[in-house]
């Protein structure tokens, strides 16, 4: 399984699934499937999404579950 942050990235930009789908050239249902983890993006789509959101590919997609923001903040504080 490939994990992603598509929903978080999309909602931060205030986009609907339809808006995002149109921007990257897929059906809006594909975005829903990605967000729910029912579908893994092709490599081409993964790059399009990362480019659209202007983030590195590994910030949008990962083979391991992403840490929560609270976990990431705690790790940053512990490293200080």
Image: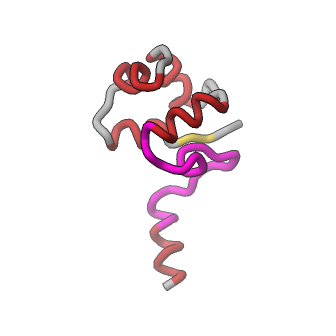
Q: Residue at x 51, y 64 (%)?
A: 71
For this view, does 22 lie left or right of residue 62?
left
Q: Is residue 59 magenta?
A: yes
User: What is the magenta range?
Assistant: 52-72
Residue 74 in the image, given as x and y percentages of width and height: 48, 72
Which color scheme is applied? secondary structure
Task: Give the percent coordinates (x, y) of residue 75.
Answer: 53, 73
Vertical relation: 20 (above or below) 28 = below
Residue at (63%, 25%) from the top-left corner?
39
Residue 38 is drawn in which quadrant?
A: top right
Q: Who's the residue at 60% across and 50% down the image?
A: 58
Q: Position of residue 3 (x, y in %)?
A: 62, 41
Image quadrant holding the N terminus, namely: top right
Outermost residue on the left side: it is: 14
Is residue 25 found left or right of 46 in the rendered image? left
The mark total stands at: 0
- The image quarter containing residue 52 is top left
Residue at figure coordinates x 65%, y 27% from the top left: 42
Instruction: Decide: is 69 above or below 76.
Output: above
Verify whether residue 18 appears in magenta.
no
Residue furthest out toward the bottom: 80
């Amino acid at each position: 399984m490939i994990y992603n942050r598509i929903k978080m990235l999309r909602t931060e930009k205030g986009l609907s699934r339809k808006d995002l789908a149109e921007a990257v050239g897929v059906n809006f249902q594909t975005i829903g499937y990605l967000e729910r983890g029912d579908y893994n993006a092709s490599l081409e789509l993964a790059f399009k999404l990362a480019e659209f959101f202007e983030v590195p590919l590994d910030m949008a997609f990962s083979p391991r579950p992403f840490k929560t923001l609270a976990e990431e903040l705690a790790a940053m504080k512990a490293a200080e």
